Amino acid sequence: MKLNIAIVGLGFGAEFIPIYQRHPLATMYAICQRNVENLNKVGDMYGIDVRYSNYDELLADPNVDAVHINSPIPNHAEQSLKALRAGKHVACTVPMATTVDECLEIVRTCRETGKKYMMMETVVYAREFLFVKELYEKGELGKVQFLKASHQQDMDGWPDYWPGLPPMHYATHCVGPVAGLLRLEADYVSCFGSGTIRPELAAIHNSPFAVESAHIKFKNSDLSALVYRSLFDVARQYRESFEVYGDKKSFEWQLIEDEQPVIHTAKKPEPEIPEKVTVPDYAHLLPAEIQRFTTKGVYDADEAQHLSFTQGGGHGGSHPHMVHEFLTALADDRDPFPNAAQSANWTSVGILAHESAMRGGEIMKLPDFNAYIER
């Protein structure tokens, strides 16, 4: 049986419409946006007849099985909670919420309603992550000893709520891969701020730091990870990276976009330890109908692509993989990856990391989100 999907937010969200239209488990049923002119433009472009400019009216539609939320960050928690309470499954772009309490509320609501939640974290479905995951599962990395990730971006000129945003409040792109590779749960975090951004930016969120760097300690593990973020007043090409150090092999992200990552192999002669590698695409893991979307944006015209997609290097071909995971999880009645508790854990790392930075590096303990699922 096909699932009726409704997409909420049609800027970045429109990227997903053709993927759902072609997936064998989905019917791309409805779209929702407050801007009626753009709503109709997108609906006409993709032949979608069911259109809502009011989110509550969408949720009242009994034909909607699941919503995929792509609205601005401040709306994520409220819209996710409304959808879950209306009996809809939820996929939501990152981050899950803006406070730890909101994360807890979403986890509790999933337990109470029995509905599924998936945070659509691109990096854990990017081809680079899938490549390293394959190396790990084959035993080629050996024992993993350390994980590191960064997300650096120049967000000058971005609209609305972005200016002055604390770097770690949008940290899931670097927290996700270091936690997700071994399915680790962050236990506590300590973070330092470094440098300062322009006073007019710092005043918006009372967040002065140009860079925030956090150490994450994982529960029931000997591992920790380092993640760092910058959004303003740091000279750096866009970089979403993660690195994994094992006792047999290690994977290091390239320094410059369009170069190749490096595999280091232990016990070789020193000059032979590093080797540049070409990361393969993983479209073969997907239904044939959506394989093309790992290497191409869904818009035909380059100028129509959303800024986050072009500046983010196409998100590593992750979009069809995320859609496939969400739909197959619903069809199989299992939790998607990441589920509500994992999404809350990853999001809260960033929220509490910023709080730690504002307190001079104080250790911040994360709630046990799994306890709220299991009650």
Image (cartoon, rainbow, N blue to C red):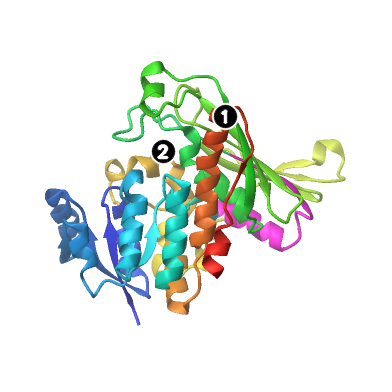
Amino acid type, callout 1: Arg
The residue segment tinted magenta is 127-149
Regarding mark 1 in the picture, which secondary structure is present there?
A: loop
Q: Earlier in the sequence, mark 2 or mark 1?
A: 2
Q: Gap in Å between the C-alphas at discs 2 and 1?
A: 32 Å
Q: Residue at x 44, y 26 (%)?
A: 232
Q: Residue at the front extreme? A: 375
Residue 170 image offset from top left, x and y in percent: 46, 41
Q: Which residue is mark 1?
A: 359
Question: In the rendered structure, does residue 144 fall within the stretch colored magenta?
Answer: yes
Residue at 36%, 26% (x, y): give it.
204
Tell me: residue 58, above or below residue 175: below
Report if residue 289 lies within the magenta region: no
Give the number of the mark in front: 2 or 1. 1
> Percent x, y for residue 59?
24, 65
* Amino acid type at mark 2: Gln
> Which residue is labeled 2 in the image?
311
Compared across the picture, whether 11 is left or right of 123 comes to left
The reply to whether residue 119 is in sight is no
What is the secondary structure assignment of the residue under circle 2? helix
Q: In which quadrant of the rendered view does residue 216 lie? A: top right
Residue 281, numbered label = none
Q: Residue at x 45, y 50 (%)?
A: 101
Q: Position of residue 251 (x, y in %)?
A: 69, 46
| Looking at the image, residue 220 lies above or below residue 11 | below
Closer to the camera in the image, 237 or 97:
97
